[in-house]
Amino acid sequence: MKSVSGNRARPAVAETSQRRRISSAGGSFMARRLLLFIQVYAICLLPFYTFAAPGDEFTFDLEWQADGCQEARRVDLDRAEPFAKEPDFVQREVLRGTLSIGPPESKEQMGLAWDYSRGMLYVDLNRDGDLTNDPDGVLETDNKGVSSYMNQDFPVFPLTISTPKGDFRYRLSAELYKYSLTKFARITIRSGYSGTTVLHDRKWGFKVVDPLRGRILRNDNFSIIRVQDYENTLLEDIKVSNEVGDLPLPTDLFLDGRCYDLEFRFNQINDAPPQLQGTLTEKVVPLTELKIKGERIEHLVFGDGEMLIIPNLETGSEPQQVPTGRFNRQALVLRIDNRRITPQNSHLKPIVFDENEVNVFRAGCPLKSRVAIQRNGNVLQFDYKLAGIGGEEYNVRSVANGKPSIEIYKGDLLLKSGRFEYG
């Protein structure tokens, strides 16, 4: 087994499978034939499986960072009764709610009270039912005002959750909304963990958000970053454009032709805050071939709820190996004129990677304009769409520079030209 910890590889130890000896007087002819058949069958299957040895393990540390991550939690402001102890709100209307935090076995309720007419938010950071004894939980907005429809955002504030593994630190921000029929708070986790590891001569960066429970579980929010020049690049220096974020944390992660079990766990070291460690363990899965057709694709991710596949876009349209199965497109990002473009219709038909054929995925450039024109009296109504080669649609305002234009010809004679106003 090969192990990598702190991105420094120890010498690999060759592994060989143990074969049970078949003994009899002079040996068994049938047993030898059976063994030969198994060997030939295994060799025939090699092209359909990862070439990594199962069980190779890579471990790496992720450091806590105060900013650079994001995951939002919603709190309905529908609590009818006041908290045990509150500031003197006089006769002003105050909206209240609670946010569940902490591990499942010891959840706590953190209270929120929004005095929106004064632009104040009170947060029960120590969860004792008293909204007057948390100085860091008294927040004031810059956008004060009162109306039937309004929202106020508040500055970042700290939160600590104590567990048997130690004290977990978070940085949160709050944005509160008051509509006519619904009132809620959007609490955003700004802090998280980041680290890098080298997998077979390529460096990868990971960012993970702990959703206020002191644990990282499947489907939690994480980001992955492909680092090109890993010898001279630190994670904080990586351009944001290299990051694919808002992905559900999978059980299995497929990178560069290899599949890994992915796990994150917190460890306690002395009295320091808990440290997060990531582990990738190689495994064997059935593979097939995939061709990616389309230009300007910067990021592409497939998933099926348990596995995420990140194809190697450096191969161009050449076939590459991917796991077999039925997958949805989890992320697609194009790079056009130094801008990142994502499709509008995210829920396209799933793609099946069949082991018996070379599968083809189409997306990206060249983009095609599709215009539907409908006459309404003396008015021509234009329905304009911009589509990729896979049928995915893009917002023209995110792709085109300036406003879309139109030119009307009669033969070679230009009759009229102009630009559209958005709206």
Image: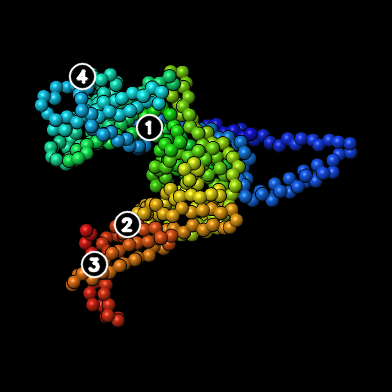
Whichever of callouts 4 and 3 sits on the residue coming sooner in the sequence is 4
Whether pointer 2 and pointer 4 mark residues with C-beta atoms closer than 8 Å, the reply is no
> Is residue 260 in view from this perspective?
yes
Determine which quarter of the picture holds residue 177: top left
Query: Can you say which quadrant of the picture contains the N terminus?
Result: top right
Whichever of callouts 3 and 1 sits on the residue coming sooner in the sequence is 1
> Is residue 230 in view from this perspective?
no
Residue at image position (45%, 50%) is: 328
Whichever of callouts 2 and 4 sits on the residue coming sooner in the sequence is 4
The vertical placement of 61 against 162, above or below, is below
In the picture, the disc for residue 381 is: 3
Residue beneath disc 2 = 395
Distance between the alpha carbons at the discs numbered 3 and 1: 47 Å
Residue at image position (17%, 29%) is: 94
Determine the secondary structure under disc 2.
loop
Residue at image position (44%, 58%) is: 363
Which residue type carries mark 4?
A: Lys
Residue beneath disc 1 = 211
